[in-house]
Image: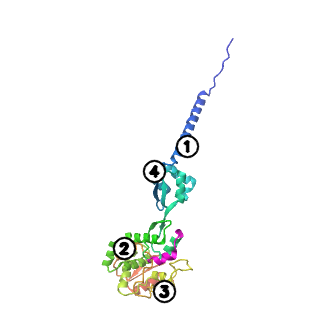
Amino acid sequence: MQSAWIEKPQFGKAFKLLISLFIISVISVGSLTIWVNWSLSAPSSDGSKKIFVIKSEESVSSFSKRLGEENLIRNAFMFNLYLKLSGLDRKIQAGSFSLPKNLAAEELAKELTEGRLDKWITFVEGLRKEQVAEILSQNFDIDKQNFLESVKEGYLFPDTYLIPIKASEKQIISIFDKTFSEKVTPDIILEAEKKGLNKDQMINLASIVERETRNQQERPIVAGILIKRWKEGMLLAADATVQYALGYSSEEKNWWRKNITAQDLEFSSPYNTRLNVGLPPGPICSPSLASIKAVVEATESPYYFYLHNKNGNIYYSKTYEEHLQKVNQYLGD
């Protein structure tokens, strides 16, 4: 009797290959899941805290890397990815944080969005103290009027500050004073004194230079003109001092109004250097270090006058007649 032939399945090897690939995939996915969970877990059981500062305008990848270097997270790449996928990267703000070492990524991210101790605030050059007070009142719980009464115009040095969230007016003023002393060094003050200027006169002139110039090249030349006019008993005739005297423009919603009329130029104020000879009673804004140095290193020139046209270009003149010609040429209707 002939035995029946039973044909074996032809897919045996392929089936084994698929099973093998499946097992490898499962193991890989499992291993990846374990690794991801490990990467986002707490790096330590130590609950002690470390102060960590996120710099102003620092990128997520940058501070994630630093968190890893300080052993506050296990893996910078995964933490960076977690923040971006969760949308928390858009909620984290610059400042300082007190971070426990035993937080998982999710808990740490929450601290970075809610637990800020300090915040970065930038004050640009050329602000008057009312503008500084307004910025502070928008970010901190301070008495704006008390702050204004406690500070001197011109001495709120323009810079980026890391200020405690719960800082009082006194603490904030102390931070400004410390920065001013660090930036405006005794050497700068000594150089000013060699030029016949005390500190207050230097800051006063620098504040006018700050508001009267448009770039670094102009500053020392304009400073030289202003110093020469002052020492020779001429009117400084700086429009910026008129702007300061006029104060806030409710029409333009600005402390530094752009449109100055002939009537404005006659505004009665000791700060109006178109009417009063000499320096104004005090600075008109907080000048930058560049403007302060421009006064100390003022350029001597044959010029007594300057003006900016509508495009911001500056023109110098040696005589009043020449100056009037340029006024008609560059500012005439």
- Circle 2 sits on which residue? 293
> In whole angstroms, how far apart are the C-alphas of marks 4 and 2?
43 Å
At numbered mark 4, what does the secondary structure look like: helix, strand or loop?
loop
The amino acid on which the numbered mark 4 sits, given as a three-letter code, is: Asn
> In whole angstroms, how far apart are the C-alphas of marks 4 and 3?
62 Å
Q: Nearer the viewer, residue 142 or 318?
A: 142
State which quadrant residue 158 falls in. Answer: bottom left
Any mark on residue 265, and which?
Answer: 3
State if disc 3 and disc 1 touch (CB < 8 Å): no
The amino acid on which the numbered mark 1 sits, given as a three-letter code, is: Thr
> In whole angstroms, how far apart are the C-alphas of marks 1 and 2?
59 Å
Image position, residue 199 (x, y; %)? 36, 77
- Circle 1 sits on which residue? 33
> In whole angstroms, how far apart are the C-alphas of marks 1 and 3?
73 Å
- Circle 4 sits on which residue? 71
Of mark 4 and mark 2, the one earlier in the sequence is: 4
Residue count near mark 4 (Cα–Cα under 10 Å), binned few <14, some 14–19, many ≥20: some
Q: Nearer the viewer, mark 4 or mark 2?
A: 4
> In whole angstroms, how far apart are the C-alphas of marks 2 and 3?
29 Å
At numbered mark 3, what does the secondary structure look like: helix, strand or loop?
helix
Residue count near mark 2 (Cα–Cα under 10 Å), binned few <14, some 14–19, many ≥20: many
Any mark on residue 215, and which?
Answer: none
Question: What's drawn in magenta, residue-wise?
Answer: 138-153
Of mark 4 and mark 1, the one earlier in the sequence is: 1
Q: Nearer the viewer, mark 4 or mark 1?
A: 4
Image position, residue 142 (x, y; %)? 51, 71
Vertical order, 75 against 200 (above or below): above
Residue count near mark 3 (Cα–Cα under 10 Å), binned few <14, some 14–19, many ≥20: some
